[in-house]
Image (cartoon, rainbow, N blue to C red):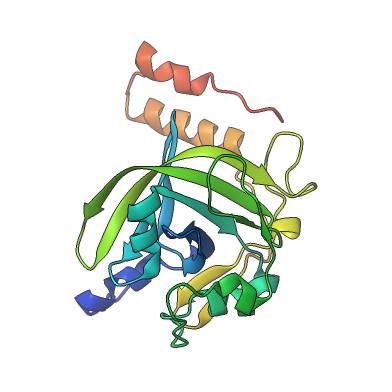
């Protein structure tokens, strides 16, 4: 297959689509700010931690530096317009510092459990975070956050805490004002894949060490 070079300054678009989030913060005066982000990912599950990349000129990083707290709210695709409003500077609709984007978007603030920034009621899931460190990584700051509280709307997870996509309807940014949302959930045939791997290893006369066999013994609730 023919490969074509992508301009290096557009390389980040290969990493799309990415889930869109609304991050809420407060400034020193307690004024709420909401910003839309897709540069966010889990980096540890023990302890539970995530990283968020924030453009240096935005109010979000000033507030996080001041209070060392933030909340990640996960919107559904039904909140596309509201996400675009909260992404005010990125969207070309600059809102002055100190003005609450949530009010302009018509979204509802509810108190968080362990941090000062509010949760967004209309979002089905929330992560309350406290800052571990902030690093300069280019035109963005990278923020490592400890997740100190997590909450969700009743009915969006099953009994094994697997997200029900038909209920959460996650919104994903492709680039600029282009978004998408998952339309179908697919599952991998894990037993079949494991069988293929074992067969190929046997053909190659490769023995699996005891240390690696622990992975073979892993079981999931549905098996």
Q: Residue at x 48, y 58 (%)?
A: 25
Q: Position of residue 159 (x, y in %)?
A: 76, 35
Foreground of the two, 222 or 197: 222
Location of the N terminus (image quadrant) = bottom left
Foreground of the two, 57 or 161: 57
Q: Is residue 51 visible?
A: no
Foreground of the two, 161 or 48: 48
Single out the residue that lies furthest toward the right.
155
Q: Residue at x 75, y 57 (%)?
A: 167
Foreground of the two, 50 or 212: 50
Name the side, left or right, on which 42 lies relative to 166: left
Q: Is residue 34 visible?
A: yes
Name the side, left or right, on which 208 lies relative to 85: left
Taking 43 as reference, is 81 above or below it?
Answer: below
Taking 190 as reference, is 34 above or below it?
Answer: below
Residue 28 location, quadrant: bottom left
Location of the C terminus (image quadrant) = top right
Single out the residue that lies furthest toward the front.
29
């Amino acid at each position: 297959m023919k490969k074509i070079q992508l301009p290096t300054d557009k390389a980040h678009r290969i990493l799309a689509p990415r889930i869109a989030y609304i991050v809420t913060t407060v400034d020193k005066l307690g004024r709420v700010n909401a910003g839309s982000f897709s540069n966010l990912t889990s980096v540890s599950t023990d302890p539970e931690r995530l990283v968020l990349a924030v453009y240096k000129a935005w109010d979000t990083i000033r507030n996080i530096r001041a209070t060392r707290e933030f909340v990640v709210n996960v919107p559904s695709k039904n909140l596309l317009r509201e996400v675009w409003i909260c992404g005010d500077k990125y969207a070309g609709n600059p809102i002055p510092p100190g003005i609450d984007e949530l009010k302009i978007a018509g979204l509802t603030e509810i108190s968080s459990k362990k941090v000062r920034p509010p949760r967004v009621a209309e979002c089905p899931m929330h992560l309350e975070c406290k800052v571990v460190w902030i690093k300069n990584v280019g035109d963005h700051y990278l923020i490592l956050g400890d997740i100190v509280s997590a909450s969700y709307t009743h009915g969006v997870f099953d009994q094994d805490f697997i997200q029900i996509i038909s209920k959460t309807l996650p919104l994903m940014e492709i680039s600029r004002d282009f978004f998408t949302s998952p339309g179908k959930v697919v599952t991998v045939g894990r037993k079949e894949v494991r069988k293929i791997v074992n067969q190929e290893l046997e053909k190659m006369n490769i023995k699996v060490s005891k240390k690696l066999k622990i992975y073979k013994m892993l079981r999931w609730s549905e098996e």
